[in-house]
Image (tube, grey):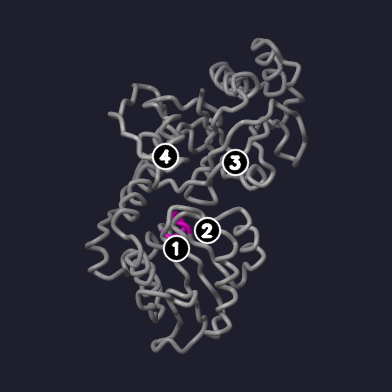
Amino acid sequence: MPFWLVRAGKYGEQEQDALEKNIITIGWNDLPDLSTIKIKDELENLYSKYYPSSKKMSIANIVGQIWRFLHEFQIGDLVALPLKTQSAIAIGKVIGNYEYRELTHNIKHIRQVKWLKIIPRSTFDQDILYSLGACMTVCQISRNNAENRVKNLLDKREFPIPEVDIEEGEIEYPDIEQYARDQIEKFIAQKFKGHDLERLVENVLNAQGYVTKKANPGPDGGVDILAAAGPLGFEHPRICVQIKSSDSPINVKVLRELQGVMPKFKADQGILVSWGGFTTKTLQEARDAFFSIRLWDSGALLEEIFKFYDHLSDELKAELPLKKIYALVSEEELGK
């Protein structure tokens, strides 16, 4: 049974709707209803009509992707949706055939899915992440028994990692930046577990200029770190920080607990750090609390580390040695 990659816009613009409405979608929204298309040549002619400035090779590539979405996806197939708003990948199961429904101005071509789990990128083996970095909206992921390995990952069962087999030309434009980020996230996940993740977050806050107090190991009363501005930590903002290092997305109950304990410490704001990311409901409620709560998943924490790395302690930098590199931006990334 195939395992598919489907994206939700270059910048994740359809991502939240896809998760909330239990769908997968593709772009090319100028195209009309495609449910009557049964021949690939017919689809190619239709695409050329609506996108007349497209080059011939580009048309063949895009038509192939749309055709897969229409006719090659089967009920029960697994799909992966790499997220932009979280450093995670949503895994779902196809439960419906192609439909044309204008859910929003940029969501018209859809298939129903059942989302099974949102999994942190750091949990996946690197060769699968590399395949999921393909610069296409739709493609099949089959290398190195990827489907069965993802099934076992969903069940949290161990599965032997095969020898990495990257065929020449399989991925035309690998995302070097994402590859590097994945490597760093995996390193942090292995190196900084449990209370060590709290130590890392505290160091980042210190690098930002906050005075902090970390809770002792054991029950923390809903707060792992207290942080405040000023040379003695008496100024505003005053922040309560709760940190979860598990690989599973945390539910909205944890967010509400943090909000409930903030008045006890007379805190202005709260930061909820979850290495495994957040459920959709948690993200929704956090948006409503934008002026008082921030959510950091592994990707957001990584951004803070990058911004303030030079100000981290020498001890921490020795544990997490990083260096800046420059790479030429590909034409694909520039949108040419």
Q: Where is residue 28 in the image (x, y as percent from the top left)?
A: 67, 30
Q: Is mark 1 on a helix, strand or loop?
A: strand
The residue pinned by badge 3 equals 115
x and y, in percent, of residue 46 in the image: 71, 17
Question: Which of the pair 252/14 is nearer the observer?
Answer: 252
**Mark-to-mark CA distance, 4 and 1:** 35 Å
Residue position for label 4:
329
Identify the amino acid type marked 2. Ile
Q: Distance between the residues labelled 3 and 2?
A: 16 Å
Which of marks 4 and 3 precedes in the sequence? 3
How packed is label 2: few (under 14 Cα within 10 Å), some, or many (20 or more)? Answer: many
Q: Where is residue 189 in the image (x, y as percent from the top left)?
A: 35, 54
Whichever of callouts 4 and 1 sits on the residue coming sooner in the sequence is: 1
What residue range appears in magenta?
297-301
Question: What secondary structure is marked by label 4?
Answer: loop
Q: What residue type is labelled 4?
A: Val
Mark whose residue sits in front, 3 or 4: 3
Cα separation, mark 2 vs mark 4, equals: 35 Å
Secondary structure mainly formed by the magenta segment: helix
